[in-house]
Image (spheres, grey):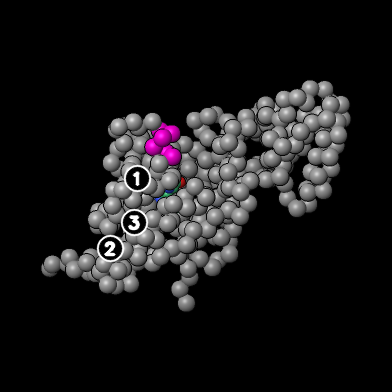
Amino acid sequence: MMKPIILTGDRPTGKLHIGHYVGSLKNRVLLQEQNQYDMYVFLADQQALTDHAKESEKIKDSIGQVALDYLAVGLNPEQSTIFIQSQIPELAELTMYYMNLVSLARLERNPTVKTEIAQKGFGESIPTGFLVYPISQAADITAFKANLVPVGTDQKPMIEQTREIVRSFNRTYQRDVLVEPEGIYPENDAAGRLPGLDGNAKMSKSLNNGIFLSDDADTVRKKVMSMYTDPDHIRVEDPGKIEGNMVFHYLDVFGRKEDRATIEEMKAHYQSGGLGDVKTKRYLLEILDRELSPIRERRLEYAKDMAEVFRMLEKGSQKAREKAAQTLDEVKEAMGIRYF
Ligand code: TRP
């Protein structure tokens, strides 16, 4: 029996933070450890270039950093194929053929693309490549005949669009060549979208409100101590608010089963007054450190030999390319464009 295929990836536009960790990385490692899947994880550098065309240096640096983040959290190149999108030219070729099956209006309706276009302030100058990236994402997914795609909820429209392309291709060319994928989304939305340290709806590099997997212990301590809590909780004896208090939000996300009782006690104490922010922050720091310090140590180890990290990516890319080439062959065969 063939194992179900999983494919997922990230745009390398900076280091990964603990929001990425709870929202997706942790889940990928769990899936890897189940040993029931053939797993591909990749760095979508071509997708990153669609809105960073002038920053290819930064993207190269981010590829190294994100690969370190992957290794540090426990993705294992012996078990999972880790590769770089741009090193698989077959993906670009598939994109070309799929473009003919998708209307411009359909792309413009994609809700995630719509939001991003508004956020990025492209105005009248939306790069064509950016508008088309959902199609290239469909190529990524279908090239590996992925059955499952674990992603954040913001990626739902991409999976939907991929499924449409698969159906359209198979219908148009009268062959069951492409596989319709399913998305796997975080069950817990609190983890799926971790807010920033400042209470902003999203943890992000540009807002400088995140804790990165590469942050050292001292930096994490300073960041936790500066977290947004309850601005009206001024004296220790004042009653405090839990809602919108980032320390309690993070405790809910990062606490384990065995921590639940303590967390609930702290919440009650905080709400009735008499529990200071410094105490709650120290407790959160303990919980975060338990999770992050092994990751941090592994990351430092791997970072000593970046050449080795890139060799690992090269090997993964070679393996991924064989699989993608096979699918491209079948696609061209189905389309009847193998002339010789
Ligand atoms: N769009 C994803 C992101 O922004 C990255 C990505 C590109 C991806 N291709 C993919 C994710 C294929 C899953 C499957 O993070």
Locate residue 119, reporting x and y percent: 43, 34
> How far is disc 2 from disc 1 in space, using C-alphas?
27 Å
> Of callouts 3 and 1, which one flags the residue occurring earlier in the amino acid sequence?
1
Q: Is mark 1 within 8 Å of ligand 1?
A: no
The amino acid pointed to by label 1 is Glu
The amino acid pointed to by label 3 is Ala
Q: Which residue is mark 3?
A: 139
Mark in the foreground, 2 or 1 = 1
- Check residue 328 in the rendering and tell me which mark sits there, or answer none: 2
Relative to 242, 313 lies left or right: left
The amino acid pointed to by label 2 is Leu
- The range drawn in magenta is 115-120
Q: Is mark 3 within 8 Å of ligand 1?
A: no
- Check residue 165 in the rendering and tell me which mark sits there, or answer none: none
Q: Residue at x 68, y 45 (%)?
A: 254
Q: Residue furthest top?
A: 234
Between residue 6 and residue 35, name the one nearer to us: 6
